[in-house]
Image (spheres, rainbow, N blue to C red):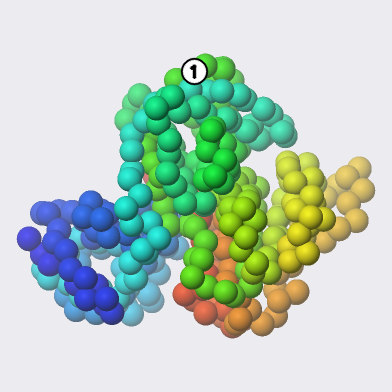
């Protein structure tokens, strides 16, 4: 069994035959950065310092040929061809949080926009899901497939799990949510998953960047920060094509009125004349760059569609001096993304 050594911590673990590095690490309680687990988002990218791997199946945008030539690999897909030394950080904050498979009941469906429904899911009476703000769950569907949704409620408000579901045309699960799902329906899920959560050991000011329902995990993180008394300055940029896409716009407006260290900037890319939009326009990550040409003293948390997350990562780190290790992202890959990986 190949032995994996993590640098600089020196932690070691072994992989089973044919097992990806990330899966082996999680199985043994070592939490490495990850997101989609299917080679589409790039969150688990790490540098192989010694040894070689089978790179597996992945999307070229998640691991470019240049990055591959620099020794990088996606740990969710990379299978060791012998002992490895990998440059990767373990995330102590997530250690010890138990991943469970649980049933849940649809408590409430609330349509907040033409294509957005907020689901409230109730757990069994004797269960409570312990999670970090920003993490996600995966629904386990009858055909064996999975669908990932971030929790929008903060951990301290855990009576119901709140999920923001955007309708994807032709999407099997979201068609069901918007068409046939009703209150008291039973679903099964696995969670919590992912490493998109606030790095509370830092005192750096924070810039949040959301597109569409990427607002959901950021909402969880911000509400957790307020609850925990975290005093770091925070600015949220939330982007949509039209104002109606900012389906909970009044909530961050309220946060900004209540908290002196919190600012909210809504950004609209394709407003129509009837929208009478007088706010910021264009791509949401470009609005950040206009306001923060130097991001070197900041942390950035970005969540939403892959094209936004990828552009933000590229432009913030290359043009705005953001250290790569201070960019945290949750890229909302779809089943189509997975299929093309």
Q: Is residue 103 visible?
A: yes
Residue 210: give x, y in percent of width and height.
Answer: 64, 55
Q: Quadrant of the N terminus?
A: bottom left
The single residue placed furthest to the left in the displayed view is 1
Q: Is residue 337 visible?
A: no
Residue 245 shown left or right of residue 47 in the figure? right
Please state the total of marks drawn on the protein image. 1
Work out whether residue 116 or residue 99 is closer to the camera in this orientation and state it.
Answer: 99
Q: Residue at x 34, y 71 (%)?
A: 89
Residue 75 shown left or right of residue 93 in the figure? left
Residue 169: give x, y in percent of width and height.
Answer: 58, 33
Q: Quick check: 79 above or below 254? A: below
Q: Quick check: 13 above or below 102? A: below
Label 1: few (<14), some or many (≥20) within 10 Å? few
Residue 309: give x, y in percent of width and height.
Answer: 56, 61
Specify the quadrant of the image occupied by residue 204: bottom right
Q: Quick check: 80 above or below 101? A: below
Work out whether residue 221 or residue 39 is closer to the camera in this orientation and state it.
Answer: 221
Q: Which residue is mark 1?
A: 185
Residue 9: give x, y in percent of width and height.
Answer: 27, 76
Q: Residue at x 79, y 55 (%)?
A: 258
Q: Residue at x 44, y 47 (%)?
A: 131
Specify the quadrant of the image occupied by residue 178: top right
Mark 1, secondary structure of its residue: loop
């Amino acid at each position: 069994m190949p032995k994996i050594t993590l640098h600089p911590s020196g932690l070691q673990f072994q992989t089973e035959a044919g097992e990806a590095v990330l899966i082996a690490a999680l199985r043994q309680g070592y939490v490495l950065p990850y997101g989609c687990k299917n080679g589409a988002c790039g969150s688990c990218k790490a540098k192989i310092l010694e040894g070689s791997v089978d790179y597996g199946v992945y999307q070229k945008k998640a691991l470019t040929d240049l990055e591959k030539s620099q020794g990088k690999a996606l740990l969710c897909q990379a299978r060791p061809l012998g002992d490895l030394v990998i440059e990767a950080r373990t995330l102590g904050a997530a250690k010890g949080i138990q991943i469970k498979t649980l049933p849940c009941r649809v408590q409430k469906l609330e349509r907040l926009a033409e294509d957005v429904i907020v689901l409230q899911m109730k757990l069994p009476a004797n269960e409570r899901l312990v999670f970090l703000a920003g993490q996600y769950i995966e629904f386990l569907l009858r055909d064996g497939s999975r669908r990932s949704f971030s929790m929008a409620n903060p951990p301290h408000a855990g009576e119901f799990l709140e999920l923001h579901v955007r309708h994807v045309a032709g999407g099997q699960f979201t068609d069901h949510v918007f068409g046939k799902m009703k209150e008291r329906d039973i679903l099964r899920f696995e969670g919590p998953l992912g490493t998109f959560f606030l790095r509370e050991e830092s005192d750096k000011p924070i810039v949040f960047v959301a597109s569409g329902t990427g607002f959901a995990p950021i909402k969880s993180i911000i509400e957790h920060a307020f609850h925990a008394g975290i005093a770091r300055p925070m600015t949220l940029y939330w982007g949509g094509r039209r104002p109606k896409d900012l389906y909970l716009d009044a909530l961050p407006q309220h946060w900004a009125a209540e908290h002196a260290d919190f600012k909210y900037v809504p950004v609209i890319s394709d407003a129509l004349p009837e929208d009478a939009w007088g706010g910021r326009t264009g791509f949401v990550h470009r609005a950040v760059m206009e306001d923060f040409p130097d991001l070197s003293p900041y942390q950035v948390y970005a969540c939403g569609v892959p094209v936004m997350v990828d552009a933000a990562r590229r432009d913030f780190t290359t043009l705005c001096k953001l250290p790569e290790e201070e960019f945290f992202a949750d890229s909302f890959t779809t089943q189509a993304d997975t299929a093309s990986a």
